[in-house]
Amino acid sequence: MKKIYYINIFFLIINIAAASGSDDIFTSGKLSVPPLIGKSELYLAMQKGTLSLSAGNSRTMGFNGNYLGPTIQVSKGDYVKFNIENKLGEESTVHWHGLHVPAEFDGGPHQVIRPGEIWKPEFVINQNAATLWYHPHLMGKTAEHVYKGLAGMFIIEDDYSKSLKIPQRYGINDFPVILQDRRLDRNGAFEYLPRMPDIMHGYTGNIMLANGAYKSSLELGRGTYRFRLLNGSNSSLFRISFSDSRMFTVIASDGGFLPESVKTDSLVMSPGERYEILIDFMEKEEISLVTEIAGGDIHEAVKIKINGTENEYFTHPETFKYQPVVPDSGQVRRTFRMENRGMGNFMINGKKMSLKRIDFSLKKNSSEIWTIENAGMGMMMNIPHSFHVHDVQFSVISINGRKPGPLYSGPKDTVLVMPGDRVEIALKFQDYTGIYMYHCHFLEHEDEGMMGQFEVLER
Ligand code: C2O
Ligand code: CU
Ligand code: CU
């Protein structure tokens, strides 16, 4: 709990210098729920589009549409085959964030899809139920492509998740909620034109989109609902809560169910992180899902109106089946020092990302303990970072020498590392070999070099 308190102080301090609110010239729309695509029809077209936010039209990019993409829903054990067509007129990639997958299909900076090309990754879904996501990962272009709208949810179910008595009717009582701040200009449109302060402190927006819509509303009957939250922003730290500060139950983190569910009234989420929550609506009322940007504004991301009808109620499970990553004895230890040396010099262990350099290699089936340090840089440059590792779900074993809070006790692939912090994680590399990435998921930092690559070797 100490940790959460500390992060809240961070919100408070930077809010003193916060910018003023956004204006109210827009009309509200219904929360759009991305269509589902499953095992048999996995076609994604990366294309250009426009997003109209009432006052202005933004030039965007989307999968199979103008902005964002369909939700992919598959089950553990499925063999999936994708056809991903690049109609952008420029290079890109599609990475499966959080997916345990052979390196050649990971969709990182090595798997470039040229304009007009169709990429055909295929693999077996080889991990437990989780809410993952997908987005481009081209060297130096990730931030721009994600900002323009290339992102979608990737939901995995398994026999265990299907057997649970929790909401699981997509778009009825189980909703994906992709939260993204965007910076509207005077014309009411957004573009991606970062300047040095944006690279340092994040390309923070003045409006909040939920599933690509501004001021979305959702009308529901009374009952229990499941929201799959994703901080899909480029570089904003969010604090999520409800307008009446009601308690909700967190049941899953990045890579799946928590060993024990957590009751809370707010969640801090760094870019790329996911949480699944359960919430009860007992009476006719209006309430909103509130997203506060660290250093920015407080937004009503989704207005929820509870009408007189009744949907289903569920008791919130207290525990879930979960096997944490336990490092074996004699495991290798590594340290990753995340450092911002100013003027866009974002480094890990003194180096900027190079596709020509493999930073280290390790053997398949080994488990390791990594220590991530946010070096900070004096008072002016204390900016948060996060650490994301491809291919694995890891366990957070300590933060500044202490056991982390219960929200960090489940499977994770991305972890927030506040200025001056040291975070220890345990990882196990199994099944696949090849080159994978690790990086800061503040996308401006990633694109400026805060990334590295490791190779998993057969032996
Ligand atoms: Cu979500 Cu390497 O990325
Ligand atoms: Cu990833
Ligand atoms: Cu960073």
Image (cartoon, rainbow, N blue to C red):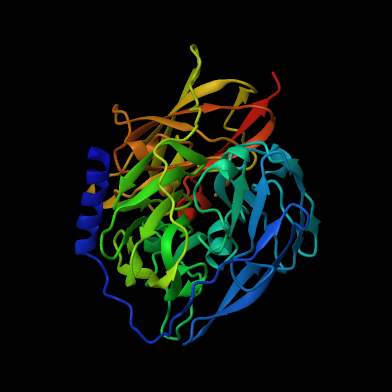
Position in image of residue 262 (x %, y %): 35, 42
Residue 162 occupies which quadrant of the picture?
top right
Position in image of residue 169 (x %, y %): 57, 58
342 shown above or below 362: below
Residue 260 occupies which quadrant of the picture?
top left
386 shown above or below 183: above
Residue 159 occupies which quadrant of the picture?
top right
Residue at figure coordinates x 77%, y 58% from the top left: 41
Q: Say whether residue 119 is left or right of residue 194.
A: right
Position in image of residue 201 (x %, y %): 36, 58
Quadrant location of the C terminus in the rendered image: top right
Residue at figure coordinates x 65%, y 28% from the top left: 456
Most extreme residue toward the top is 330
Q: How many marks?
A: 0
Q: Is residue 107 visible?
A: no
299 shown above or below 135: below
Position in image of residue 43 (x %, y %): 76, 60
Residue at figure coordinates x 51%, y 41% from the top left: 256
Quadrant location of the N terminus in the rendered image: top left
Residue at figure coordinates x 44%, y 47% from the top left: 346
Q: Say whether residue 86 is left or right of residue 381.
A: right
Q: Say whether residue 15 is left or right of residue 211.
A: left
Q: Is residue 345 visible?
A: yes
Identify which residue, 182 or 447, lies in the foreground: 182
